[in-house]
Image: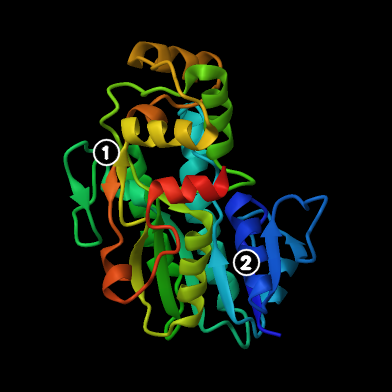
């Protein structure tokens, strides 16, 4: 049975991907800091994200490695948290590279998570893979993450970078929190509502990652986002419709900044800023999205 190693695999995207790949006939090993109570039939190996240990044995003769490791950005951007966000990505990527060089028969392909936030935040620009990177913390982290990947990728191993947008899923991510807020009547426009919401259904996200594993012509960086990004006002209206909630109170910027910091203990800019990206390379290379439109995606999930 073909074997996929997923580092950072115990999170929302990792578990979703492992279930998707298992249904497609793969065996998956999840590499993480803490063992989940329910592995769902997958195997598990522990790591600290910084050192090569026994977990690296799972790389021997594996079909592919998929690296999703990185501290969540859903937090207050204190100096400590910012340091962990950067180090967790760069150090884990370098550690995987060191482990691959010790394996006698390493996997032929490494699929590496990155972020569409690398293009920055702009309400009036739509970016594709050829667009320049943005300015700020998130673009800086994204660039350092990808630089670490290029430095760690062994020679003659195919490397695929997936610049991920906002993943919509049933069992994790931010959609559940947005739904709870919406059902409380607070699902109105956030801030001025013009910020971009580049999103992707978890099924398509998993299909893109699987394509990166299987399609030998895939190499380099790809944006993983549905082809039709929307602004926040349109997104929240579609979410209310899918949840059967006719009205949602808007959230002015001052309220968002206060609530994010003092109640949700997270960064208000995650809600107040956004970006428009399109998956130009995937479309050009013939990838077909199962959920290209927002309302259809939300109808399936909600």
State the image coordinates of residue 181 (x, y, percent, origin top left). 54, 24
Q: How many marks?
A: 2
Crowd class of label 2 (few under 14; some 14 to 19; many from 20; radius 10 Å): some
Q: Identify the element where label 2 is drawn.
A: helix
The Cα–Cα distance between marks 2 and 1, rounded to whole angstroms, is 31 Å
Label 1 packing within 10 angstroms: few (<14), some (14-19), many (20+) = many
- Percent of width and height locating residue 274: 32, 37
* Residue 2 located left or right of residue 95: right
Q: Which residue is mark 1?
A: 121
At horizontal 46% and vertical 45% (from top left) the residue drawn is 86
Depth check: give the residue in front, 132 or 215: 215
Image quadrant containing the C terminus: top right
* N-term-proximal mark, 2 vs 1: 2
Residue 65 left/right relative to 73: right
Q: Is residue 92 above or below residue 189?
A: below
Q: Residue at x 61, y 44 (%)?
A: 172
Left/right of residue 168 with respect to residue 49 in the rendered view: left
Circle 2 is placed at which residue position?
20
In the image, what residue occupies the spot 31% across and 61% down? Answer: 279
* Quarter in which the N terminus is drawn: bottom right
As drawn, the label of residue 243 is none
Residue 135: which quarter of the image?
A: top left
Report the residue at 26% width, 38% height from top.
121
| Left or right of residue 285, residue 185 in this image | right
Q: Which residue is at the front of the view, 294 or 71?
A: 294
Looking at the picture, how far across and down is residue 28, in whole percent? 69, 71
How far across and how far down the image is residue 199, in percent? 40, 48
- Residue 205 vs 244, above or below: the answer is below
């Amino acid at each position: 049975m073909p074997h996929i190693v997923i580092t950072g695999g115990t999170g929302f995207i990792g578990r979703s991907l492992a279930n998707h790949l298992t249904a497609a006939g793969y065996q998956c090993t999840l590499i993480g800091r803490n063992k989940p109570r329910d592995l769902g039939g997958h195997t598990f190996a522990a790591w600290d994200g910084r050192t090569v240990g026994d977990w690296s044995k799972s790389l021997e003769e594996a079909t592919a490695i998929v690296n999703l490791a990185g501290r969540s950005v859903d937090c207050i951007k204190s100096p400590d948290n910012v340091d962990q966000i950067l180090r967790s990505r760069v150090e884990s990527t370098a550690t995987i590279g060191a482990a691959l060089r010790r394996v006698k028969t390493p996997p032929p392909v490494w699929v590496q998570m990155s972020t569409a936030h690398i293009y920055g935040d702009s309400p009036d620009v739509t970016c594709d893979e050829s667009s320049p990177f943005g300015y700020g913390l998130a673009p800086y982290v994204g660039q350092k993450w990808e630089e670490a990947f290029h430095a760690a990728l062994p020679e003659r191993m195919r490397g695929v970078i997936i610049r991920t947008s906002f993943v919509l899923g049933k069992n994790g991510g931010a959609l559940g929190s947005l739904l709870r807020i919406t059902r409380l009547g607070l699902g109105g426009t956030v801030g001025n509502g013009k910020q971009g919401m580049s999103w992707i259904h978890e099924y398509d996200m998993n299909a893109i990652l699987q394509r990166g594993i299987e399609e030998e012509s895939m190499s380099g960086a790809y944006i993983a986002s549905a082809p039709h990004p929307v602004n926040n006002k349109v997104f929240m209206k579609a979410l209310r419709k899918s949840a059967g909630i006719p009205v949602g109170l808007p959230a002015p910027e001052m309220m968002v900044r206060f609530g994010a910091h003092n109640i949700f203990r997270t960064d208000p800019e995650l809600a107040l800023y956004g970006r428009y990206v399109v998956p130009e390379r995937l479309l050009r290379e013939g990838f077909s999205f199962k959920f290209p439109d927002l309302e259809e995606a939300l109808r399936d999930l909600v």
